[in-house]
Amino acid sequence: GAVVSQHPSRVICKSGTSVKIECRSLDFQATTMFWYRQFPKQSLMLMATSNEGSKATYEQGVEKDKFLINHASLTLSTLTVTSAHPEDSSFYICSALARPSSDEQFFGPGTRLTVL
Amino acid sequence: AQSVTQLGSHVSVSEGALVLLRCNYSSSVPPYLFWYVQYPNQGLQLLLKYTTGATLVKGINGFEAEFKKSETSFHLTKPSAHMSDAAEYFCAVSDDPLTGGGNKLTFGTGTQLKVEL
């Protein structure tokens, strides 16, 4: 089946620094990728939808200047958490839509971000 | 607005016993319902989905789920648990049958399934 990877799997950073998380579709092209956030004991919450070659669409309440998304190629989307603070500590998960060959959303394994 | 409630954050069963993971949804439009499984250090994997038609949906690994509109439920079952079924399970709802399709998935909080010998 289709595989989506994320890098890094976990990252610890100091408050005020920026962190970049990569999401790659390994064996298919993804015109659309999604970024989710999951707090402990809570459900995955969609942050934004990323379309290759265009600006991301952010969900209500998500700061686009804080969570920068770039989908520069059909196999790579990046999420940059700028000026990270402890409240940004969370589990970030991406998924990719393998259209037109498939309508299924394939998920990455997630990235654990801890901001000190 | 849509929402999903998964009753029981942790469920423990004996190997060979029935698995029942509960999911109730709320949706103002006909829902499309999904179950995903997540094994440790892996991404979510689609188990099964209900879009239209037959309300009993069969998925991978022997799992099935039944859409009951009157009960707004989509419980996941497996007749006989196996050790390899130990994982976290997420129920999700969408107003689009295509998982993603420009419309977001709304997830439940997940249920951790433990299978004991």
Image (cartoon, rainbow, N blue to C red):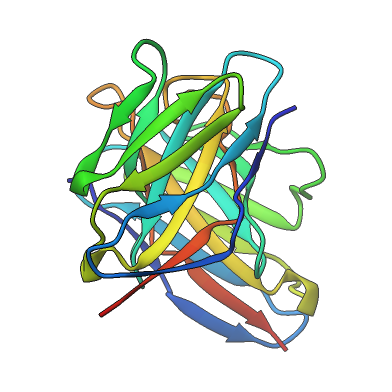
User: In the picture, which quadrant includes the C terminus of chain A?
Assistant: bottom right
The x and y percentages for residue A67 are 68, 55
Q: Is residue B40 above or below residue B73?
A: below
Query: Which is more toward the observer, A15 or B73?
Result: B73
Query: Which is more toward the observer, B46 or B22?
Result: B22
In the rendered image, the residue lying farthest to the top is B53
Residue A73 visible, this orientation: no
In the rendered image, the residue lying farthest to the right is A61
Q: Is residue B107 above or below residue B31?
A: below
Identify the image quadrant of residue A88: bottom right
Query: Which is more toward the observer, B111 or A58?
Result: B111
Identify the image quadrant of residue A92: bottom right
The x and y percentages for residue A50 are 53, 38
In the rendered view, does B106 fall on the left or right side of A22? Answer: right
Q: Residue at x 41, y 12 (%)?
A: B52
In the rendered view, does A110 fall on the left or right side of B23? Answer: left
Q: Residue at x 25, y 80 (%)?
A: B117
In the rendered image, the residue lying farthest to the front is B17
Q: Is residue B28 above or below residue A10?
A: above
The x and y percentages for residue A115 are 69, 82
How many numbered discs sit on the rendered protein? 0
Identify the image quadrant of residue A108: bottom left
Q: Residue at x 26, y 37 (%)?
A: B59
Residue A7 visible, this orientation: yes
The x and y percentages for residue B103 are 57, 25
In the rendered view, does A85 fall on the left or right side of B57? Answer: right
